[in-house]
Image (cartoon, rainbow, N blue to C red):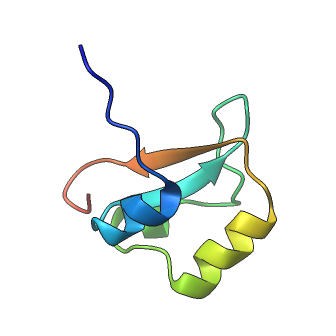
Amino acid sequence: MSEIIVTPAEALGMGWSIIPIKSDKFPMLDTWKDYQSRQATEAEFQAWLNMNPPAWAIITGRIS
């Protein structure tokens, strides 16, 4: 099985909805439900990058 590795910025560019997560795989956000129907804005994404998340999650389903 081969892996597909993309950066968070590439994932957004491909139309995927992503969110930052902690090392325990729980979101770093109070709520992530909005991202089931929309992508993060550039400002949100930049703020998340400044949080220095250890990992990112892809919101699956119709949005991505």
Q: Nearer the viewer, residue 28 or 48?
A: 48
Q: Is residue 36 left or right of residue 63?
A: right
Q: Residue at x 70, y 60 (%)?
A: 30
In the displayed image of the protein, which residue is found farthest to the top? 1
Q: Position of residue 49 (x, y in %)?
A: 70, 65
Q: Residue at x 40, y 67 (%)?
A: 12
Q: Is residue 27 left or right of residue 16?
A: right
Q: Position of residue 8 (x, y in %)?
A: 50, 57
Q: In the picture shown, does residue 38 fall above or below 41? A: above
Res 22 → quadrant: top right
Q: Position of residue 15 (x, y in %)?
A: 28, 68
Q: Residue at x 50, y 45 (%)?
A: 57
Q: Is residue 62 left or right of residue 48?
A: left
In the displayed image of the protein, which residue is found farthest to the right? 51
Q: In the picture shown, does residue 2 fall above or below 17? A: above
Q: Residue at x 72, y 52 (%)?
A: 28
Q: Nearer the viewer, residue 10 or 15?
A: 10
**Could you tell me which quadrant the C terminus lies in?**
bottom left
